Amino acid sequence: MASITELKWIKDLGYLDFVRYWGYDIQGAVYQEIVRQNTGDKLPFYIAGATKEKEPDIRIIHVTDNYLQEALHVVEVNMPRILRIKSGEYQPDRCELCDCCRHNRVLVKPISILDLTAGI
């Protein structure tokens, strides 16, 4: 990764740390919940991160339970829609920016130069 400490701007949310920007909090919350359901143990969640900067940084990051609980709540709230998308009842919302949207893009019309900075 480029940086462990650099914040990323998300329209309508503000600045996010890399853990929440890349959804590692959601992954950790899901992993933690799967372990809890199967063993009864609620384990802590850590990320081992290293950067590819000129002078690399390496850290072990403890994602605290308050972040994991918030992320798990997001998953729970969105689960009905996720299941409908999975079953084909709904189409997923397209951001047009992620790898999935870029991979499946169908060109139907040109975009404006203003669209290039619309998310800023």
Image (cartoon, grey):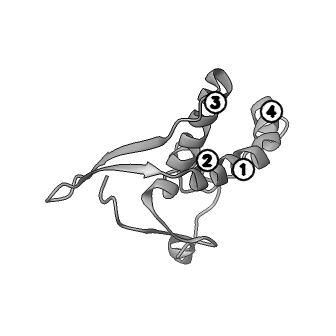
Tell me which label, 1 or 3, sits earlier in the chain: 3
Tell me which label, 1 or 2, sits earlier in the chain: 1
Q: Residues within 10 Å of mark 1 (few under 14, many from 20)?
A: some
Q: Nearer the viewer, mark 4 or mark 2?
A: 4
Q: Could you tell whether 45 is left or right of 87 in the image?
A: left
Image: 64 above or below 11: above
Amino acid bearing label 2: Val
Q: Residues within 10 Å of mark 3 (few under 14, many from 20)?
A: few
Does the residue at mark 1 contact the one at mark 2 (Cβ under 8 Å)?
no
Element under disc 4:
loop
Q: Could you tell whether 36 is left or right of 113 in the image?
A: right
Q: CA distance from mark 1 to mark 2?
A: 34 Å
Q: CA distance from mark 3 to mark 2?
A: 42 Å
Element under disc 2:
loop
Tell me which label, 4 or 2, sits earlier in the chain: 4
Tell me which label, 1 or 4, sits earlier in the chain: 1
Q: Which residue is mark 1?
A: 73
Image coordinates for residue 98, horizontal then vertical, percent: 53, 51
The tag on residue 88 is 4
Amino acid bearing label 1: His
Image: 84 above or below 74: above
Pick out the residue farthest to the front.
Answer: 41
Element under disc 3:
helix
- Residue located 33% across and 58% down the image: 4
Amino acid bearing label 4: Gly
- Residue located 63% across and 60% down the image: 109
Does the residue at mark 1 contact the one at mark 4 (Cβ under 8 Å)?
no
Q: Which residue is mark 3?
A: 36
Image coordinates for residue 16, horizontal then vertical, percent: 50, 66
Q: Nearer the viewer, mark 4 or mark 3?
A: 3
